[in-house]
Image: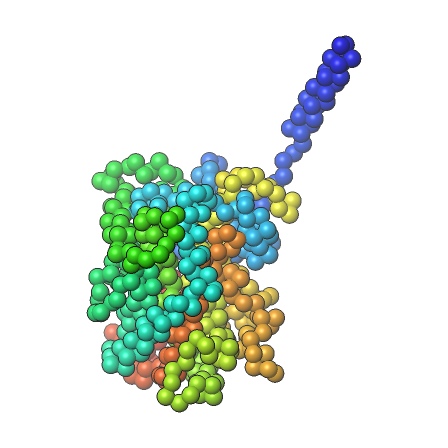
Amino acid sequence: MGTIIDFLAILATGALLYTINRRRKPSLPLPPGPKGLPLVGNLFQMPAELQWIKYHEWSTELNTDVLHLQVAGTDIIVLDNYNAAADLLEARSSLYSGRPRMVMVMELMGWDFNFGFRYYGDYWRKHRRLAQTSLQATAIKQYRPHLAQATRKLLKRLLDERDDGNLIPHLRQLTAETILSVAYGIEIQQENDPYIKLSEAANQGAIIAGVPGAFLVDTIPILKYVPAWFPGASFKQKAREWHKMTRAMTNLQKIEAGEKDDAFTEDVLRNTLAALYSGGSDTTVSTIATSILGLLEHPEVVKKAQAQIDSVVKPGHLPDLDDEPSLPYITAIVKEALRWREVTPFGVPHALSTDDEYKGYRLPAGAIVIVNEWAMLHDENVYADPFEFKPDRFIDPETGKIDYSRARDPGHACFGFGRRICPGRFMAFESLWLTIASLIATFDIEKAKEKVTLPSGEEVERTVELTHEYDSAFVA
């Protein structure tokens, strides 16, 4: 008996010494980051706009691909390089598939229906399953007639109204017709349709509020209880208006009844379809517009693409998705549009579920993980002249075919990572490809010839400038 007691005592003593030694052992350092202030950390250093550029500057200055920020007690990890994002979000996806608490978007604006914003769990898995089943690469072929019909209606509108000078409403009509037809069985019969206006208004709010750091309430959640009349609480008024639009959008007529999995209840269908609609409309419009702006600056690209289309597509016919393998230059244009002016410089933030270690640094549980997609898509080591619109970067000059060994497919970053990768990426690409191919096949894309008179009386050529417009970083 004494031997057993002595043995247990030795074990207990060893365990105690191990624990003490472990506690004395210094913990790993956090990743590099700009020095902040006591208590508030980097709160007052957070950029008010173009955050992705500032984060990249900090990463460059500190020679790190993993940047650490601390904002009023909240840890933020910024991944500035594809390899770091792949190592963590792909290889360790079980740890990084969560979402941070998004008070403004989820709790005040009513976007809790959107599984893309929800924390990793049963709700997310159920909705994600429906989305992936409907939008996998083989399943989306059934939607091609919808894409073709919406694209041809766009071409007719542009031909009939080619002098109005405003392309964006036509592109919004295109994406709304496509997604509403596929998801809800709704046929848009008129311009300025209420469904389109509703989704546009709801999405605009989510785009503004979804940028990390856009509203201080996301960093200090207790502010959600501040009454709307309180000075500086204008965010509550905005949230109230956006909430009305969000709820109205989710209650659109759902897809027509038919055979469906019993697991997909009405709520799951409604919420999933609304999430797909909100996620696909603005992003598609922005990418098509970006492509057109690039083509305006490079008429030689338009001519080269038109020549390839003429050599493949029969006279009197429009290109279709079956022509994609034979039209690699169109694919290169689409890929370059996705890379050149990315729609979402960050994507939706991830959340780290438990403490982790990477390259000798400690990554704390609960940290918000931001992927700087802008930095990855403009990495000079991957894309020569990254701020130039150059579809030829993806083309092998000898074979004329796509060659991603020359420049990485931008899909590595622009559609997200790991278990949170965009489920609609295949359909999004087909929609972009067909629209851009059809526009190039039917129109000469050229700059307007007329000049604009400035207030000073000076006449200058009309120009277009791309901007990222968000509210200031810490709107109260």
Q: Residue furthest bottom?
A: 315
Q: Which of 374 and 100 is in front in this view?
A: 100
Tell me the quarter of the image containing the C terminus: top left
Instruction: Tell me: 196 left or right of 120.
Output: left
Query: Residue 331 in the image: x percent, y percent?
Result: 48, 74
Residue 402 visible? The answer is: yes
Image location of residue 369, percent across then percent down: 50, 48
Q: Is residue 112 above or below residue 132?
A: above
Q: Give the camera-side residue of 258 and 388.
A: 258
Q: Position of residue 403 (x, y in %)?
A: 58, 74
Give the residue drawn at x 35%, y 36%.
Answer: 222
Question: Up-down: is 200 above or below 43?
Answer: below
**Residue 305, x across and y down, in percent:** 46, 83
Which residue does the image show at 46% across and 40% down from the upper left?
Answer: 74
- Which residue appears at 36% of the width and 43% of the height? 103
Q: Viewer-proximal residue, 420 or 318?
A: 318
